[in-house]
Amino acid sequence: MLSHLCAATPALYILWFTMAQVAGQEDREKTTALKDLLSRIDLDELMKKDEPPFTFPKTLEEFEYAFNEYGQLRHIKTGEPFVFNAREDLHRWNQKRYEALGEIITQYVYELLEKKCNMTKAILPVDASEDEPTTFIYLSPDALSNPSKLLVLIQGSGVVRAGQWARRLIINQDLDSGTQIPFITRAMEEGYGVLVLNPNENYLEVEKPAKSSPLPSPPEPSDEPAEKRERKDDKEGKKKREFYEKYRNPQKETETERIPIRENGSSEEHVLYVWDHFVSKAAAKNVFIVAHSYGGLSFVELMNQREMQVKNRVCAVALTDSAHNIWLQETSKGTQDWMQQHCCNWVSSPEPLDTPLDPMLPDCPRVSAGTERHELTSWLSFNSIFRFFSEVLEVKEDEEMEETSNIVTTRSSSLKSKHQDL
């Protein structure tokens, strides 16, 4: 019996191996079929299927929100802060709702600039025709005529527009931390003219015209009877329609195209344009600049393009978590030396406010903004920045007085010598 069992063992082994191969083949086929099925289903589109329409309120009142006496956005009925997740498991819809509120906030800040700060718009390009896209900046009444001081504000990149540092702060914290209004009012109190840039409005977005459907190509000749072929086509077409109806996006976003604004198609272009057409023509003897994040990069690019003009007109520059890089932007040695003397960069850091930090590049001193949150660096550096400007201006005026005194002394000595000679 043992001999029979031994003889049967190879056969059993072969049978087991064959069954394992068959089972493995079946598993592979099932896996392939599952992958094929998943590849046909766009999960993102599936998630969009049950979204509510993208129709949102047009005013803060319709959103049922308002800013309280502390500049905080609160729900009119509950008094609660803004809630992003208004509907669970609908992230895209919540994001669209947030963006709709953000557009209302932008208009609200424009109103504050005009009514609270008494600023006016200047349209760019200055020679724009009626049918071309335009942007604008804001100027205080004395921005171009103030003979002493001019403050220029440049925000970072993104959705923020003129008068804003960070939309998220405006919505979730308060107007003081998220807008430039505290900088504007403080500057006006201290005798500055003010110019507010708008470096992120670079294009006009318009809806793309609908594409005309191509004419159907004639069907290829077939041996099938026409009636049978039509039934087959109808059946396949119905299957496709049912499939795409099930997984389609019921509110596909409109396709748009962007028309760039002439000479203002980027933040760098905008800053250069405003310098050439406004700042360089302003009467102010001393120009001061506050530039946040990408605004710092745009300022350094301005220096690359107008180095001598900037050196002659700008008294001091306060950068807040600036995104500039003197090596990648290929700045000159002269620019780097000037930045060492006239710039200071308040960066995100856990260190206390104004704590000196090691320089990463040989451009300008770096100090702590007293926060690790990038978007808060401008607001938390607010008092330090104005103190920095005052100190720089005081040193400059002392140097000018000393130069004037030396000139007067030299002239007096020269006249006395001539008198003695006579």
Image (cartoon, helix red, strand yellow):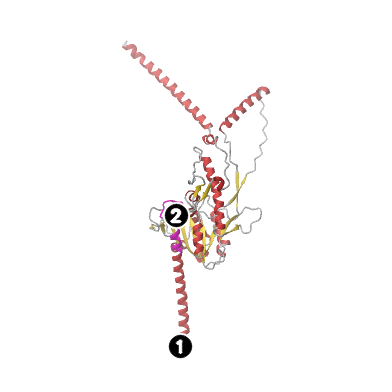
Camera-side residue: 265 or 110? 110
Please report the bounds of the magenta region as a residue range: 370-389
> Please, what secondary structure does the residue beneath circle 2 have?
helix
Assign a secondary structure to mark 1: helix
- Residue 161 in the image: x percent, y percent? 54, 53
Residue 399, percent across and down? Answer: 45, 71
Q: Mark 1 sits on what residue?
A: 420
- For marks 2 and 1, give the CA distance: 63 Å
Q: Is residue 222 above or below residue 189?
A: above
Q: Residue 377 carries which label?
A: 2
**In the image as oriented, which residue stretches furthest toward the top?**
1
Q: Where is residue 128 in the image (x, y as percent from the top left)?
A: 64, 57
In terms of secondary structure, what is the magenta stretch mainly? helix
Q: Which residue is drawn at 64% across and 53% down?
A: 132
Classed neighbour count for the residue bearing mark 2: other residues with Cα under 10 Å, few (<14), some (14–19), many (≥20): many
Residue 348 lies, in percent from the top left, at 42, 53
Image marks 2 and 1: residues in contact by CB distance under 8 Å: no
- Residue at the (65%, 24%) spot, across then down: 231
